[in-house]
Amino acid sequence: VSTSRNITFASCSFEHLGGVYALGADGGSQDMVVTNSTFLDISGGGVKLGKSGERGAPAPAAETPPSEQDRGFLVQDCLFRGIPAEYSGANPIFAAYVADTVLAHNTIHDSRYSGVWYASLALAPLPLISPYKSEKSWFGTYGQRRVGLGDGQLCAQRARAEQQHHQAHAAAS
């Protein structure tokens, strides 16, 4: 999807696909939710959020107005298994230059590359990445982090709820 707002993919199955990514959002897309979905047997990655400056294209400028930024994404409770199947440099979850992003409670099995990849500019602080399960996947330094939340109201509310959940769980431990 490109230049889109308020889209939800809930309980979807993305299987047997030959593209570089099963699902992508960029071009100023905002407030997209991917939840309780399955990604299996995909040539490339699962979810690609934002533009990364790939193939020589410039990365978004740091002064991009919030209304034109890729922001307000939530990827939660999804299963990514055995991807990428062919494009070995793709990731189950890829987020580049996005703001107000939450990646929460996803399960990633048998990834050939890193399970989650994230790139940031000044306009895009690190996302809130909640605990996730992994098996035979490689991860960078992606622990749980609190991020600065801006104009993405929908995602900001969800991020606060996630933080409260984790604080309550930590207090109970």
Image: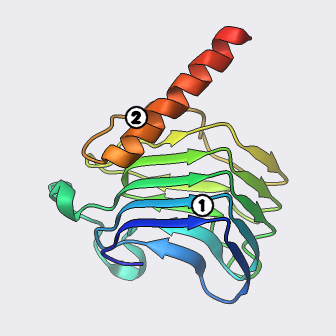
- Point out the image quarter for the C terminus: top right
Whole-angstrom CA distance, mark 2 to mark 1, is 18 Å
Labels 2 & 1 near each other (Cβ < 8 A): no
Q: Secondary structure at mark 2?
A: loop
State whether residue 59 is above or below residue 159.
Answer: below
State whether residue 130 is above or below residue 171.
Answer: below
Residue 131: percent from left, percent from top: 67, 37
In depth, the one of 46 and 74 nearer the eye is 74
User: Which numbered dot is residue 68?
Assistant: none
- Point out the image quarter for the N terminus: bottom left
Q: Residue at x 60, y 39 (%)?
A: 141
In the rendered image, which quarter is residue 70 located in?
A: bottom left
- Tell me, yes or no, if residue 145 can be seen here: no
Q: Residue at x 66, y 15 (%)?
A: 170
Q: Disc 2 marks which residue? A: 147
Q: Secondary structure at mark 1?
A: strand
Residue 137: percent from left, percent from top: 78, 54
Q: Earlier in the sequence, mark 2 or mark 1?
A: 1
Residue 67: percent from left, percent from top: 19, 60
Q: Residue at x 69, y 50 (%)?
A: 106
> Looking at the picture, which amino acid does disc 1 mark?
Ile
Q: Disc 1 marks which residue? A: 93
- Label count reads 2
